[in-house]
Image (cartoon, coloured by chain):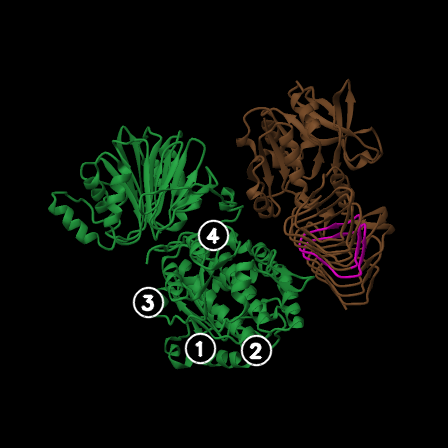
Chain colours: A green, B brown
Amino acid sequence: MCGIIGYNGFRDADKVLIKGLKRLEYRGYDSAGICVIDKKLKIYKDTGEISKLEKNIPSFKGDIGIGHTRWATHGAVNKINAHPQLSDDKKIAVIHNGIIENFKILKEDLKNKGIKFKSQTDTEVIANLIKYNYKGNLENAVYSSIKKIKGSYAIAAVCEDEPDKIVGARNESPLIIGVGDNENFLASDITAILKFTNRVIYLNDGEMCVIAKDEVTVFDEKKKKLDRQEQMINWNFKDAEKSGFPHFMLKEIYDQPDTINQVLRGRVSEINRNIEFNENVEDLLKNGVDSINIVACGTSYYSGLVAKYHIEQFTKTPVIVEFSSEYRYFGTKNKNSLVIGITQSGETADTLGALREAKKSGCRTLVVTNVTGSTATRISDAYILTQSGPEIGVAATKTFTAQILVLFLIALKIGVNKNEIGPGELYKHILDLKELSRIVREVLENSNKILDIAYLLKNAKSIFYIGRGVNYPLALEGALKLKEISYIHAEGFAAGELKHGPFALLTKITPVIAIVTKDSTYDKMITSIGEVKARGPQVISIADEDDIEIEKYADFVIRFPSNTRHLSFIPIIVILQLIAYHVADMKHCSIDKPRNLAKSVTVE
Amino acid sequence: MKAVILAAGEGKRLRPFTEAMPKVMLPVGNKPILQHVFEAVKKSGINEVIVVVGYKKEVIMDYFKDYKDIEINYVIQDKQLGTAHALLQTRNEIKNLFIVLAGDNIIDEKSISKLIEDNSEYSLLIKENSQPSKYGVVFLEKGKIKEIVEKPKEELGKFISTGIYKLPKSIFNKIEDLSSDGIYDLSSVIQSIVQEKITINTIIADSWTDIVYPWDLIKVNKEMINCNSSSLSGLIEKGVTIKGSVSVGKDTKIYSGSYIVGPVIIGDSCEIGPNACIFPSTSIGNNSVIHPSSEIRNSVIMDNSHIGSNSFISNTIVARGNIIRNSFSSIAGETTVEIEGEFKKVNNLGAMIGEDCTIESHVIVDPGIIIGRKCNITSMKRIKENIPSNTKVM
């Protein structure tokens, strides 16, 4: 998604901006540009990689400027549409994330006032609107302009006549201020500025800020000055390094034993034999949870589907999992239900919208997210952090694992509160949880077999993933991982559904990956594999180490350690991630930055 | 001045502990050996190190990804041919005089400072040793090196090379020259320089410790935590007794009735007790659990390990990820241990347990026994012989 960085300080602004843009690269983009105030506004922008921009850029002299990575929403990908956008008198430059809903009306209006437009972007409209409202003070002009704008935005603007400040504003699109010593920053994402400072101030919707060299000022929607506290970010800049792995994704897959320890940390006590969350969460889960709605998008939606099985099994409470973008408009909002929003970034626009709608209808809201201080944590009644550190690969791996594990703990906790899980059963789960990081280490260590399977799969045109019960959402996630990074068409199906349609697509050259666990679905899965085999495809089965029967039915078997019981979904998901990774690697795909995709989607 | 730290080797004599991590990453006082080296180097005034990595390099690079105290640059040695070959990999990173150290030896910062301040172009830190035959023995003439003999058959001389040198950039030409003759170790390169009548100064190191055998970890752990100061975080319940210097990490819980006598280090996110007793000189890694009424003495317990209730653990190493059920005993005593074909007599040694084993209840292990990685031992067993990795004891 688009990325914003602004700098006002003592360093060479062009260098700081480019470094920041490189940090934002992982969010996905198609073009980028910077503007530095060097007496006049000096702009350079281009399509493609930041490294190309860095190579070709002329040297600007100036210590204040703004930079942007664009992921096109309005208008094609080209130099003209890249940001920063200038007003027609070339005095005001603007960068912008989000979508302006009423930009057509505003544009017509400005055209009638004689302003000429060069690009198709909504951003150029903002630049000219600010220019139109400009009467010698940039923050006043921005203030008057945002009052006319409808939609989501995070804006940074500079003006040639006031070369000592950057003005920022946000509504439903993330924007943070980085505070340094005699230098200050503005960014859409913490990673852009972590190299320089870890002190940040979060802006809320409707707020504006003015970034001077030695001071930052925040205003509310009535232009009243606010007193905002800085927060310290514990993430380290070097977290975003590959540690010797060829791709971030592989590093993040290998991070998972530690991710598991981080999720359990302070929450699961082996000696007290209980699961603890912070007070807000405990209160929320305590009593009167009659039904649960889970709202999420993309991979987080799949982690919601996994959680559905656990919560229903452990608590006998019905769970409805919905896409945030659907729930917010159509979902049934029952006052007695608990709404759990899942968003890695805490900024996913659709999920934020869904949570706001839920709250409006009086539902209690709980958020599972990876980012402290993100919008989601501020608009919900309580939140649980997945504590998995920054994830750079666009394909979610460790954050997905952390999410499903947090949700598993929530399921256990509600089960205990409702007396559906007794102390003996809970202790068994706790022992299993404590052994989990060691089991994942074992899967990672014995992953050579997966390379052979990947070799087998790399030329496939289409691959099916099948499973039953909790393995069904895992099949969906496995297919999603594969298609997003290897560009092979892949679909996940509930194994029982194959015969109701998808069979028509099966051919001899469609490999089928079947997830088989030793539980009540085992015999049915064997039947499904038989049905598939009868139509000719090769079947690759992911099965328990103790399963001695499976070789009779499947052509290839990948094993995960036995004794995992209810937690088999964790080793299985790691195996699915490794399959996707190795297939994509063998096909030389751009694993960390797949085409057309962005890490966190902050537009609707 | 930059420092080159050689950290590419495996450390075969420390198996099974080095099966999943390089020797430099073995914990001493809950920190990898390499981190102790970084700290000493930093204190001596060096701000940038070049670390030569090879065997299991990801483990090193990942662990130190957040490390801020010193600037770390990595250089990869694909094949571990020898120390000179490892050093040669850093050629492009070095501009003038530099120092080179082994990542698996613990050295004090004063000795490094003395080496840096020394006026000569070539100098070496040496140390007195009563068993020089294990090392490169240095013969001196007026404080300069006369000869270096690698692992002499007889106990000759009294000074050994610590492998810590200050060297000029020109050494790389010499190494390249000799490597074409198949000479890849730094001692031989130095010996050949001595023969060319180049003077190499020597400085006696204050303290220098090498970790060669698994039980050295217990000894060095004791030395390192002795100088540790107390710091208590986490949750310590009423009725816990703490004496001496004890440090307890974040999110750790110590339950009532536990008795802890320092020097002891306990990592983050552990659970200990009730009524657990931990005596000098013990370190316990992160995310570990010590169940009620267990006693631990002079031992190294690494991350993610579980020790069941009523266990007795003494002079023992428990690697990462072990699950040990209740009533486990490790007997400490005098024993002879075979390491890579060499027989070594050791006093007062308990068990050495590799990572990710599962040991069921009521298991007793004899002195000096090495249990490999990922072993499963069923309950009520007495272990009298070494057990290779991936074994099931039924």
Residue A288: percent from the left, percent from the top? 51, 71
User: What element does badge 3 sit on?
Assistant: helix
User: What element does badge 1 sit on?
Assistant: loop
Q: Nearer the viewer, mark 4 or mark 2?
A: 4
Res. A61 visible in picture: yes
Seen from the viewer's position, the closer of residues A110 and A207 is A207
**Which chain letter goes with mark 1?**
A
Q: Residue at x 44, y 45 (%)?
A: A191
In magenta segment, residue B245:
no
In magenta, the rendered stretch is B293-321
Q: Nearer the viewer, mark 3 or mark 2?
A: 3
Seen from the viewer's position, the closer of residues A241 and A180 is A180
Between marks 4 and 2, how big is the CA–CA gap?
Answer: 46 Å
Between marks 4 and 3, how big is the CA–CA gap?
Answer: 26 Å
Q: Which residue is mark 1?
A: A536
Kindly identify the amino acid type of the residue bearing the numbered disc 4. Answer: Val
Q: Which residue is mark 4?
A: A371
Tag 4: Cα neighbours inside 10 Å, few (<14), some, or many (≥20)? many
Between marks 1 and 3, how big is the CA–CA gap?
Answer: 44 Å
**Which chain letter goes with mark 4?**
A
Q: Are marks 4 and 3 on the same chain?
A: yes
Between marks 4 and 1, how big is the CA–CA gap?
Answer: 46 Å
Q: Which residue is mark 3?
A: A329
Residue A520: percent from the left, percent from the top? 56, 79
**Which chain letter goes with mark 2?**
A
Seen from the viewer's position, the closer of residues B345 and B269 is B269
Cβ–Cβ below 8 Å for labels 4 and 2?
no
Q: Are marks 1 and 2 on the same chain?
A: yes
